[in-house]
Amino acid sequence: MTLSIRNQLPGTVVSVTTGEAMATVKARLAGGQEITAAITVDAVKDLGLAEGTAVRAVVKSTEVALATGPVAGLSIRNQLPGTVTEVVAGNAMATVKVSVPGGELTAAVTKDAVSELGLADGSAVVALIKSTEVALATV
């Protein structure tokens, strides 16, 4: 299956914590960092997710926010440090490619955000992704 979603990071499940309807799944990405996905218990069962399962963390570019450094006091579990490799700005929106250990992320942000944050090739950033916006696919 081919997807229009650009952000697909390979990893391995390191833990699964289930509740009544929802579960949190932590995966260690190829670059060593961890990402948390909040998915349904049914999805955990259907995908056969357990410690050691190879997965891809899939995130739409519109669900990736950028900060110029780590952010404290936030409920967002996933904060992946990286470096901007490309900025393509249009009249209102921009795409920002970020190299992270083990892969690349694309963030769709406003042109104003690019300007206000001073984003350019080589800028250090932190990609912020809510766990509820991370989907998992088995490999």
Image (spheres, rainbow, N blue to C red):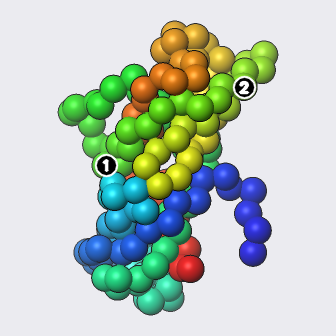
Quadrant location, the C terminus: bottom right
Which residue is found at the position 68% from the left and 55% from the top? 5
Q: Which mark is residue 88?
A: 2
Observer able to see residue 23: no
Q: Which of the two marks, 1 or 2, is nearer to us in this view?
A: 2
Classed neighbour count for the residue bearing mark 2: other residues with Cα under 10 Å, few (<14), some (14–19), many (≥20)? few
Which residue is found at the position 61% from the left and 36% from the top? 97
Upstream in sequence: badge 1 or badge 2: 1
Q: Which mark is residue 103?
A: none
Percent of width and height locating residue 103: 53, 52
In this picture, residue 9 sits left or right of residue 11 = right
In this picture, residue 112 sits left or right of residue 51 = right
Identify residue for label 1: 77
Residue type of the residue flagged with mark 2: Val
Percent of width and height locating residue 87: 66, 25
Displayed quadrant of residue 91: top right
Percent of width and height locating residue 77: 31, 49
Classed neighbour count for the residue bearing mark 1: other residues with Cα under 10 Å, few (<14), some (14–19), many (≥20)? some
Q: Nearer the viewer, residue 1 or 22?
A: 1
Give the distance between the C-alpha atoms of the residues marked 1 and 2, in whole angstroms.
27 Å
Which residue is found at the position 55% from the left and 74% from the top? 137
Which residue is found at the position 57% from the left and 19% from the top? 120
Q: Nearer the viewer, residue 17 or 55?
A: 55
Residue type of the residue flagged with mark 1: Arg
Observer able to see residue 41: yes
Which type of secondary structure does the marked residue at label 1 adopt? loop
Displayed quadrant of residue 63: top right
Which type of secondary structure does the marked residue at label 2 adopt? strand
Quadrant location, the N terminus: bottom right
